[in-house]
Image (tube, rainbow, N blue to C red):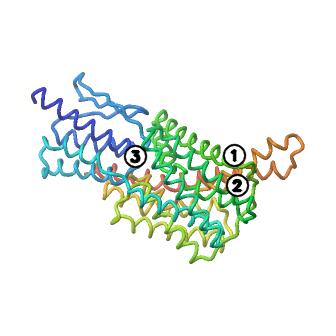
Amino acid sequence: MDPSHREAALKTTALAATLLFAHGQTTERTVIAAERLGRALGITVRVLPYWGEITVEIEGTPISQIVPAKPLGVDMGRVLAVTTVIDQVCDGTLPSDAAHSALISASRLPPASTARFTLFAALGAASLGVIFGALEATILLLIAASAAIGALARRWLSGFSANPLVQPLCAALIAGIVAAAAGRSGLPAISLVAFCPCMVLVPGPHILNGAIDLARTRMALGIARLAYAAVIVVLICAGLLCGFAAVGAELATTGSTRPVPLAVDVIAAGCAVASFGAFFSMPWLLLPFPIAVGMFAHAVRWALVVVAGESAATGTLVSCMLVGIIVTPVVDRLHLPFAALAFSAVVSMMPGFFLFNAAAGLVELVSIGPSAPASLLTGIAANGVTAFLIIMAMTVGLILPRMLFDRFSSARQQSR
């Protein structure tokens, strides 16, 4: 192979790896897809992803390319477009010299429109309000309006700053201001008005991708992903509490929510799944699948928690394992990012209510000081531990089928 062709093939392979990595594909699938593309282009490469860059090396030579890449976003439309280009090159339906320009076109696909993004942010936040027991029309409209304003602010800020931390901070600040103002007006369920618009900001795919990297012993990358997700959660809490402080109010902790009827719970879960499909720029034709899976999973969780009397963590673990079993072969078949699709299906199970309750309790503890009642301390501990257990249950439940499926697929390929 002449040097110019080898250099072009390396450049194309590095571009494909960068696009997949930056838009939410799991690290393992990014490496597999890029190495597969390299072979189709006539080179054998090793792909080494790190936080901040990807190194693509041609095996047996000192030739390599280092490209900047940070896995900050989730865009299923772009991931699908990139994997389609890779499939076409590998199948011979797309000429090798046209692959680079096709990947550039895939990288320029627009995200979900502002109208869709805003509408589904409002729908998702209101749906989470229903799941947590807010059935009053006034409260749901207020939750939806707060989330819609936050979504518009996020899109507006994206045109001024590429920093991904600014958007959730400002959206949470808006949610805090709206909830605090509503509380001064005497409206009930203010905690849900504050929490629900913030729950749609929780970076679930980054948590799952980080956990998968840790499970595959990519320790540095996994820790970096989880640290990024943790920073976003901290900023969401900070923005929410600052919003209350700006209005001169305090966000008090609230008790556990009452369960809603099964039909209401399942329909609301489906709406929440649809909203996150919009956040992740999921093509419309793919949206029914995660909605159906999410509704099924939530029905299972509702039966385990409400009927069988199991804990929220146990119900979440079983439901997420079922989602992982159903979703894993589908995402491999369609070359979709596992973390984004799986998280979309179980987003309504995220323990945002407990996380934000614990944060509110900590602020209340600091303001009261040594005279704080013991019940406040136990409430903070209970909310924090519950949130941790549910997150662990979601993570293990989703990635365990993923890991087992990969192990089975590798063993089957080796036997062949």
Q: Which residue is mark 3?
A: 26
For disc 3, the neighbor class at 10 Å (few under 14, some 14 to 19, many from 20) is many
Image spot of residue 113 (x, y percent): 38, 57
Q: Nearest the camera: 9 or 115? A: 115
Looking at marks 2 and 1 on the same chain, the residue that comes earlier in the sequence is marked by 2
Q: Nearer the viewer, mark 2 or mark 3?
A: 2
Where disc 2 sits, the SS reads helix
Where disc 1 sits, the SS reads helix
168 vs 86, left or right, is: right
Looking at marks 1 and 3 on the same chain, the residue that comes earlier in the sequence is marked by 3
Marks 2 and 1 in Cβ contact (< 8 Å): yes
260 vs 227, left or right, is: right
Kind of residue sitting beneath label 1: Ala
Image spot of residue 394 (x, y percent): 55, 55
Image point (65%, 74%), residue name? 307
Q: Nearer the viewer, mark 1 or mark 3?
A: 1
Q: Residue furthest top?
A: 62
Q: Which residue is mark 1?
A: 246
Per the model, the C-alpha gap separating discs 1 and 3 is 40 Å
175 vs 85, left or right, is: right
Per the model, the C-alpha gap separating discs 2 and 1 is 9 Å
For disc 1, the neighbor class at 10 Å (few under 14, some 14 to 19, many from 20) is some
Q: Which residue is mark 2?
A: 180
Q: Quadrant of residue 61?
A: top left
Does 73 appear above or below 299?
Answer: above
Kind of residue sitting beneath label 2: Ala
